[in-house]
Image (cartoon, helix red, strand yellow):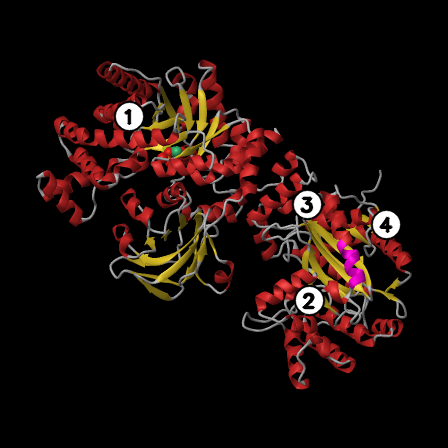
Amino acid sequence: MEQKKRVYTFGNKEAEGRADMKNLLGGKGANLADMNLIGIPVPPGFTITTEVCTEYYQLGQEKVVELLKTEVQAAMKYVEDIMGMKFGDKENPLLMSVRSGARVSMPGMMDTVLNLGLNDEAVEGIAKKSGNPRFAWDSYRRFIQMYGGVVMEMKPESKEDIDPFEEIMEHMKEEKGIENDTDFSVEDLKVMVTKFKAAVKKQTGKDFPTDAWEQLWGSVCAVFNSWMNPRAEYYRAMNKIPAEWGTAVNVQAMVFGNMGDNSATGVAFTRDSATGENVFNGEYLINAQGEDVVAGVRTPQQITKRGAQDWAKLQGISEDERIAKFPSLEEVMPQPYKELFDIQQQLEKQYKDMQDIEFTIQDGKLWMLQTRNGKRTGAAMVRIAMEQLRAGEIDEKTALLKQDPIKLDELLHPVFAPAAIKNAELIAKGLPASPGAATGQIVFFADEAKKFKKSILVRIETSPEDLEGMDIAKGILTAKGGMTSHAAVVARGMGKCCVSGAGEVQIDYKARTMKARGKVYKEGDWISLNGTSGEVYNGLVETQEAELSGDFGDLMELADTYRTIKVRTNAETQRDSEMALKFGAEGIGLCRTEHMFFEGERIKAMREMILSDTLEGRKKALAKLLPIQRNDFKSVFKAMAGKPVTVRLLDPPLHEFVPHQLATQKELAEEMGISLEDVKLKVADLEEFNPMLGHRGCRLGITYPEITEMQARAIIEACLELKSEGSTAIPEIMIPLVGTVKELKQQEELVRATITKVFEEKKDTIEYLVGTMIEIPRAAVVADKIAEVAEFFSFGTNDLTQMTFGYSRDDAGKFLPVYIEKGILKDDPFQVLDQEGVGALVELGIERGRKTNKDLKIGICGEHGGEPSSVEFCVRSGMDYVSCSPFRVPIARLAAAQAALRK
Ligand code: PEP
Ligand code: MG
């Protein structure tokens, strides 16, 4: 049987691997191999595959080292031959680096060891051969530091302590009156090495290993171990990287940026990763090694002259001072710079994307150590792809598929000014419920949101009563509630920044205070919210408006040419409808009528209707509501200008509309001319043990048909009025929370009868549809029967998820994070559609529905309609449209185009 290959060599413009072998060799390993193949100078080395990482966790350290030994020794020989040096030799020692490298880059999450192969003898050999003892001893002290920290776990003993090696160095700097690491003499470095080794022995009880091969295996295993360190695990969880992928290990001959003033090391980007501008940029340090640039020990300098000048301007440094103290690589090492510039162009051409590269210049010679697709902001992502497309470097499909739809969000909302957020004090973390940045003064009650020009509404949780205040506030912070809590859903709909479920925030409504991390904040105190990350900051943090650049518009247009399903929006006001249209919505998929009942006079009439004991009383109140609803509908239909609008009849439990505070109860009693006691009794009567499964949805319309009649009438009268004014309206009336076909039939007949009456009265007609939401599992199962009555289905995946899992939408925040942490669930099913379970019901519903009604129009209006993986599912399952909050419309457009391209 052919033996499994575990080690792939590269060097001297040859390689056993290729760029497309990222799964096996990791991103770094595959690209190191590939750079050799395209003739770029890369120090020789070898990659141990990601599969070995998996074996490491199955078989353990000893077995894996045994399995690897022969191949690694042969690979080392290959490197030795190219370099003309020998690993573990005294006179002419080859030094190696060991680096991690997973399929996708996980910057800084795993471990690296440089200068491997040094000991008390080898250091002398290197000093002699290079004629540069300072460099030799500097490399040795760095090696002990890195190997000690990474492999021997020489870490600070408590979080207050500094790194034990740094501590020794700082001490010596003080003693010698030295500022920079580069100022240590050879003798100093020798003393340092002795001190480092003694410290290792003291803290770990072990001698520092002198055998090169022992050092190598120690480092390789340390990299495999680091795959499971908490940092890496957290990063994987955050970025949905499976643990099974494993990391590869890259073992590579060292080249030295710390060989003197003709040596340097740096990192660079082929374009600006913040703005996307096509300018080569980066940072470097003379006479330095590897981590120094990112570690911040010395201030790195700019690679290009232009970058250095821009930097100096920002720092208020004169051109003379800049040239003297902070010259660019372009100025100090023009030859290697030119070579680097040409290579970065070649790399971008080769990989067709912005590259993040690492390089080292050893004694004037340039070596490339890494290239990978660079991380970037949402704005840079769009700009880079569109510029590459226009330059003919990539095709349309590549430009679209390269986008991360979620990142578009960054382009649509206000953001913190970069300079302001740098020094902001974090005071709590919650869920990133609705993106954007907001700053304002704390108010604890929605009706007081106007108190300050900019306010942040801080609540334990919000209710529909708070709607107006939420709208006025700049941002919303809640202590309880998940991603589909009232606050989260409403805020997303409004495009308003919201952090929900910040459990560590304690709110005292009576005292009008909020406590976070030991500090008390009063009404009027300034706080700032980042709804994109869930972070809460103390004080006023400056924000700035996002700009919708031309590239963004172009990208959206491009997406639309490939998209196969429609994208609608969930909106119930003229303002939201107009905003959604701006973002490209092709209709309204869900107009939640209950949101219309909270403003001003509306809520009064609504409460009167609810609290009436008689049909007459209810009808009287409904008569007041009719013209208000008709006007509301009219403005929404008008804003949508001939695009379809799905209006859902009243859905939430009625107790959400009645006043729960004594003062408002008194007010209502007076208005209605009944006693306070009566109001209280009625409110108590509406209380339910489980309102989400109680008297709501079509159950309301069935028990109070007059509500359905009023709403159907308001919708159709609004449309007829528009028709008479020359505008088109396309109404689709939707019955919520249907579980049996009889429920739907009963409501559908009532709606049609009411509309027929309106047509007769107005002597005019209009086309309309009557359909239903599929949001109860039973409805999906009997979809064939329901489709005989319904003209359209809209999957309400919020409720469908709630009822399929049996997780309360409002209470799941307590356990879902634990479920995700423990791996019971991969994602929050209220955010990312559970395709296996809830998705299966959706597919069943579609299949059965279309069986009896082949013209059935099908969409989704749950929160999932704007989540990329769920949108892809909707495309695959054959829906006609997705519907989502206005700010997610662009995301859905792009995700739908990508889904069509991947299909
Ligand atoms: C749903 O249940 O998915 C839905 C859209 O309705 P609501 O969120 O209003 O219950
Ligand atoms: Mg619902």
Residue 546 is situated, as x and y percent measured from the top left of the image, at 48, 49
Q: Which residue is mark 4?
A: 13
Indicate the quadrant where residue 393 lies.
Answer: top right
| Mark 1, residue position | 718
Q: Earlier in the sequence, mark 2 or mark 1?
A: 2
The picture places residue 306, in percent across and down from the top left corner, at 67, 60
Asked whether residue 335 is drawn in magenta, I would say yes
Percent position of residue 699, x then y: 28, 27
Whether tag 4 and tag 2 are in contact, CB under 8 A, the answer is no
Say whether residue 472 is visible: yes
Q: Does 886 appear above or below 782?
A: below
Badge nearest the viewer, 3 or 2? 3
- Tell me the residue that label 2 is attached to: 292
Side (left or right) of 1 relative to 848 = right
User: Do the numbered discs 2 and 1 sit on residues whose CB atoms are within 8 Å?
Assistant: no
Q: Answer yes or no: do the residues labelled 3 and 2 have beta carbons within 8 Å?
A: no
Q: Amino acid at mark 1?
A: Ala
The residue identified by callout 3 is 353
